[in-house]
Amino acid sequence: FGLGLIGLFVGNFIPMSSKNRSIMDCKRMNSASKCSTKPFRERKRMKSLKYIVYASLYQDKNQERLNSDYDRSSSLSNAKAGRRESFLFMMKILCEIETACYELRQSSCKLDAQQRIDKVHMCLDSVDDVLKAKAFTARSGARLINALVKLSRSTNGSHFVVRDFLKSTNFCYLWTQQTIPTLDRCSFIDLSIIIYSAGVLELKLSDRFLFSWFHAAGNLQTFNARALSNVLYGFARLDGIALPEEFMTDWFRAFVREVPCMNSQALTNCIWSTARLGFEPPKPVLNSWYYEACMKIDSFNHQALSNSIWAFGKLEILPPASFLELWFQYSCDKISLSTSQELSNCLWGLARLGVTPEETFWKKWKAAFLQRIHQCPTQELSNVLWAMARLRYVADENFLEHWKSTAYQNRNSFSAQELANSVWAFGAMEINPGTEFLQLWLNCCSKSLDSFKPLEISSTLWACARLETNPPLEFSSACLDYLSVTFRVNPSPRIVSNVLWSCARLDIALPEKFWGSWQLAFSAAASKMNIQELSMTLWAFAKLGLNPDDQFFPIWQSRYRDIGLFAGIAEFGMIIWALSRTSERIISQNIECTSAILSQWVEECAQMYSNFTTQELAVCISALGRIGYRPSDEFISGWSSTLIPRMNEMSNEELVSVVYGLARIQVMPTDGLVDLWVPLFHERMSSFASHELSIAIWSIAKLNLTLPQKTTDVFFELSRKQLSQMSAQSLSNTLWASATLRSFPDDEFLNAWCDAFLNHSESFIAKGLSNSIWALATFGFKLSRRVVDAWCTRFSACLPHISDQAIGNAMWAFGSLRIVPDLDLFRVIEVVLSRPPKDVSSHALANVMWSFARLGITPRHQLFDLWNKHFCTTDFHQGDELNAVIWALSRLSPRIDASVYNHWQSCVEKHSDVFTVVQLLSVITSLNRVRSDIDMSFVTELLESHRFKLKNASVRELIALFLVIAKVNVTPSNSFMLLWDRLILERANQLENSQIAAISWAYARLGIEKGAAFSRRLQSAVTHSQEVGV
């Protein structure tokens, strides 16, 4: 036993060369790893025995032992007797402090808590005597602060006592001043102890001290494994220390050399410290660490496992799969022993790495955390929720209730970042914690708003938008005011896009001051935006109803050209949706960029729509429809074949979006799609919202689909009940679609519609007004004076901005209903005719003049001349328009202007077969009224060009045409008469006596003799009519 004590003494106190020391450390490391399976109590007993011997030797009053120790001190080898006494006194105090630390840490200590603290104070009182000793050296300084570290860990509460001592005294200053002169004579062990202990005690080291330390440490060639680990750990604990690149290069080189001798704790400390200092280890360093960690991971305790994964998360370096597999295996075994901080750190690290744990780990982690959640500090609570959101793990109700309960108790202790991260996590998981809790949380945010950073404000607003919960008005206003100022300093692209997107989702009105700052911030940050931020920004513009101006869109477009190829389907969807709501002017001015976006998006969709959800399939086609971009037939075919098998899964909104998109791009759906869509529409119609009903019927009308009568009846019944809830646009769309489909509603429906119109008349736009009055005229519904007056009032307000087509339709409707509106009709026409001729359609010109004739109102001479000029420069190619013009002129002017007639005739000759039989007889009648010297050859050619349309005419139409020909005394061609005779003879049995008499009169009028066969057939028809009593 005596020999053992002597050996222990020599091993601890006789200095060794660095080489021998390094070898001894390696042997000791290997020995420790081999005997790590010894029972814990036995190892602890051996360590305690070693410490007892160590302390007793220093307490020995044997002067010879102290003299020999003194002689070994190089700094005191030639000192005087006074310094000898000082050294002995200093050693005695240090020994007493260390002995006190040991006694306080023993479980057999019988002192109560207050007595323990008093003993700590007694030890601290003697620290000043050590600092003032003349024999104080850097080695003594290392031993002193190491003793303070042990003292701070000796008992509960001692850490705070030591911390208060260091803050309230000038210990740090005196210690550094006393240590610096002899720092360069320290061994690597003392140098490592100094930095390690200073880090643990969080001392503020001066630049002069650090410079001296780095100079003494050199290139770290003499440092062993433990010293390297302690040095870096100490620097990591020292706040505000910027390590030189040369030092870290030397450290990494030394680490690769010494890493085989490191135990699990040293390995963990090294990677943790590297992450804390913000240095990314070179690849050789990482490879060495991975190898040793995998070999020794069975000796990693729960803290080492947590710290290692936290470090990789901090560095954002994904470890190899082999290490992660072992890490999860041993973590699951030891996770129940982890503290709340370790549990929080490991989940935070996994979230940063994007590594999703398996369900086994989740269950054990959650069980361990729930046992400690009520003692968790706020940072751990916030980090855990944030990590769950990053890992896309939706917390269950039990976990959330415990979390909310603990967070509520500590709500006033949350920092600004913790408040923002927590509410962001709820938004990312799309879990609404409840209105009451959320409002309470936002109130806490309001109180701490001065401490919020711009990113934290944007995260909070973003979360509110995701949870569809409007924050208090005062909070949102304060946030926007704060951002108005901070936007001017280095604006972040993420913040710029998130804030506008959040305001759009929450319908927050943008103050003018904020809007100006945001535009400047966007101009500065756009060049750094990624595709997601660009898409969110454009979407927010459209959602807020802000048309991108000439300044915004070029900047946006420029950045998009650089990174648009990296867009995913979600980003494309937002961009296309936004463009679909952007003004036509912006799209036309940037048609090249818009076309490129659309082409690229269609290509992306064509490759991916087999993986689309039903919502994405519907939005895809509706967005294209809003823009009016028609994709290729191959795209439509592939889209339809993907959609049809999944149509039963679609929601009502998605069903409506499908037909709406097809209607807007004017693509007829396939028979298979229609056969599925119509029954689904009929089946679910009762659950459609009012706007969905109106959009659906509008789309059906645009596509010219035929609905079963039972579906139409159900539609009118449901629509009548919802008319009062419809918007102005829905009201006009419903009525227009019904008229287009020729599905005439009953008077009850139309009366209800008129009541709804009176309530919403101020919201109608010009197109809605004209479509509505056109539909009512098509139905032949008699309008009340009140409805007419309300319509005229709103129409007059919209007049300067009304299109020529809307004015033409409205005039036609009043002419058809024979209602003279309470409008200055001449002013209405001047609005149309004051525009350039190229901007006025032939349809509008024809309808305007026809309505004047129908209402018996003669335009002023100047207005008539202006109309003539427009007419003579417009190409008319529709039969109804040409017929309406000649009919109106025949009733408004006794003598038509030659230039107008010649242009009308040239249009007819250019489009020779544009008239129906009914229109043809109307045209000939009107020509007879317009010109007394009617051009017989023109009429003959007109009849000849329309000869083949006689086959589809009814008996009445054939006879009426023949009578008109006879009346104007135009002799048809032989081919025309032969065809007419044959058609009449085929239907001779259908003729009435009056019709036979009219035909005979027409033959006599034209001087044409009837053939024998024709006469016999007519006589037979007369005889048959007499027999049946006609």
Image (cartoon, rainbow, N blue to C red):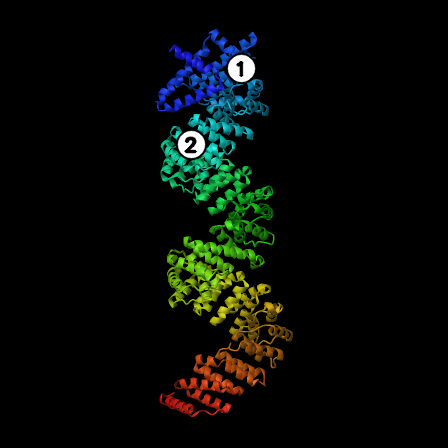
Q: Which element is circle 1 on?
A: helix
Which mark is drawn over residue 553? Answer: none
Residue 214 pos. (x, y %): 56, 24
The one nearer the camera, 548 or 637, is 637
The one nearer the camera, 10 or 995, is 10
Residue 370 seen by the camera: no
Local crowd at mark 1 within 10 Å, few (<14), some, or many (≥20)? many
Q: Give the distance between the C-alpha atoms of the residues marked 1 and 2, in whole angstroms.
A: 45 Å
Q: Is residue 89 above or below residue 355?
A: above
Q: Is residue 352 above or below residue 833?
A: above
Three-letter amino acid code of the residue under disc 2: Tyr
Left or right: 362 as drawn, with respect to 228: left
Residue 62 pos. (x, y %): 46, 7
Residue 824 pos. (x, y %): 60, 70
The one nearer the camera, 62 or 933, is 62
Three-letter amino acid code of the residue under disc 1: Val
- Residue 888 position by quadrant: bottom right
Residue carrying label 2 = 291
Local crowd at mark 2 within 10 Å, few (<14), some, or many (≥20)? some
Q: Earlier in the sequence, mark 1 or mark 2?
A: 1
Q: Is residue 971 above or below residue 129?
A: below
Image point (49%, 52%), residue name: 572
Which of the image's four quarters has the N terminus? Answer: top left
Residue carrying label 1 = 130
Q: Please identify the residue farthest to the right as the structure is shown.
A: 862
Image point (49%, 69%), residue name: 776
Residue 217 pos. (x, y %): 54, 23
Mark in front: 1 vs 2: 2
Verify CB contact (< 8 Å) between mark 1 and mark 2: no
